[in-house]
Amino acid sequence: MNTHPRPSLRTHPRPSLRIRPRLRLRIRSIRTRLLVSVTAAQVSRAPLDRGEVTGITRVPASDTDPGSEIGQVGAALNRMIDHVESSATARQRAEERMSRFLSDAGHELRTPLASIAGYAELMNRGTGKSESVLAWRRVSAESARMTGLVEDLLLLARLDEGRPPQSVEVDLAAVVVEALWGARAAGGGHDWQLELCLDAEPLVVGDERQLHQVVVNLLANARVHTPAGATIVATVEARHAGRVVVRVRDGGPGIPRALLPTVFERFTRADASRTRADGMEGGSGLGLAVVAAITAVHGGRIAVQSEPGRTEFTVELPSATEGHAHDRPTSLVPMNLP
């Protein structure tokens, strides 16, 4: 009988498992570096010089851990991609707007130029005296139309540059009264009314000529889009709220709902639905754009509410002074009195 003890089976200890988490972290770090590198390479190949930039792959959120340096790099890269895409999209939209603007401006200038050329040719043919007089009148009218368009374009360009307006104290009530008398002369077939709601002085700080143009454009817009005999009311409000408000309300057919969001954009027209009473060709589509630009540069706001039978434009401007109550009642002044 074998009395020797059997050798014991000795097992070798397994390698420590502590290395595995470190290995996983290392693999993850290498993977994140590769993702960041691939993403950066994709950004470098993106056509940033043209069109919209969209669809660039981001670093996955799981690899943007702010607790690690490489994760911070991935998060920063994602933010950079967001900025690149938004900037490229904004640039693309600006280029498209500029292209449409130049196209529309060229079309608007071409129309009066073609008319002037046609009437000039008619005069060169040696027509009768009456035809020559008519041709001269049309040439003068088209020249004035083209001059007004160019002046509006130049004014919009100056306002786009952000030039501050003149800083003088302006009485908006006086501005509205003067503009109303001019509108009455241009459209005597309408019922022009002035409403004053003044609990404070209606004083603002700005360029009086530009503010006058705001009111003139709003009144002209109401006149050409309403039939003869329609009532147009201009209201000036100063209510101790630090704002002076000018409203122009008419009883015309209204602005289509689909057009309201773009009514203050350049070359926007509503002539298809707000038919001009005089049957003349519509304006350039710059009048309300000029109103909005002047209002904005004076720190104000403009809004419009419209439905069939009622359209009201509201311009709010910062008051030059809070003023004191004058206990003046609201008054409604007709402007068609002889």
Image (tube, helix red, strand yellow):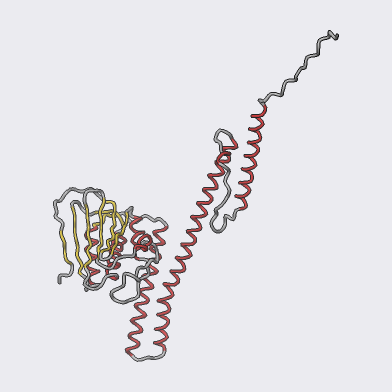
| Residue 219 placement: quadrant | bottom left
- In the rendered image, the quadrant that contains the C terminus is bottom left
Q: In the displayed structure, would residue 76 be above or below residue 335?
A: above
Q: Position of residue 234 (x, y in %)?
A: 23, 62
Q: Report x, y in % for residue 162.
A: 40, 55
Identify the residue shown where x is 28% and y is 74%: 277
Residue sitting nearer the eye, 59 or 72? 59
From the viewer's perspective, is residue 102 above or below residue 296?
below
Q: For the view shown, which residue lies furthest in the right direction?
A: 1
- Could you tell me residue 107's position as x and y percent? 44, 72
Residue located 35% across and 61% down the image: 260
Where, by quadrant of the figure, is residue 267 drawn?
bottom left
Q: 136 and 27: which one is in front?
A: 27
Q: Residue at x 37, y 55 (%)?
A: 164
User: Residue 289, can we see it?
Assistant: no
Q: Is residue 222 above or below residue 68?
A: below
Residue 28 seen in this snapshot: yes
Q: Residue at x 35, y 59 (%)?
A: 292
Q: How many marks?
A: 0
Give how far across and how far down residue 56 sits, in percent. 57, 50
Horizontally, residue 22 falls left or right of residue 282, namely right
Q: Quadrant of the N terminus?
A: top right
Image quarter for residue 174?
Answer: bottom left
In the orientation shown, which residue stands out farthest toward the front?
1
Q: Seen in the image, is 180 located left or right of residue 293?
A: left
In the image, 324 versus 245, the foreground residue is 245
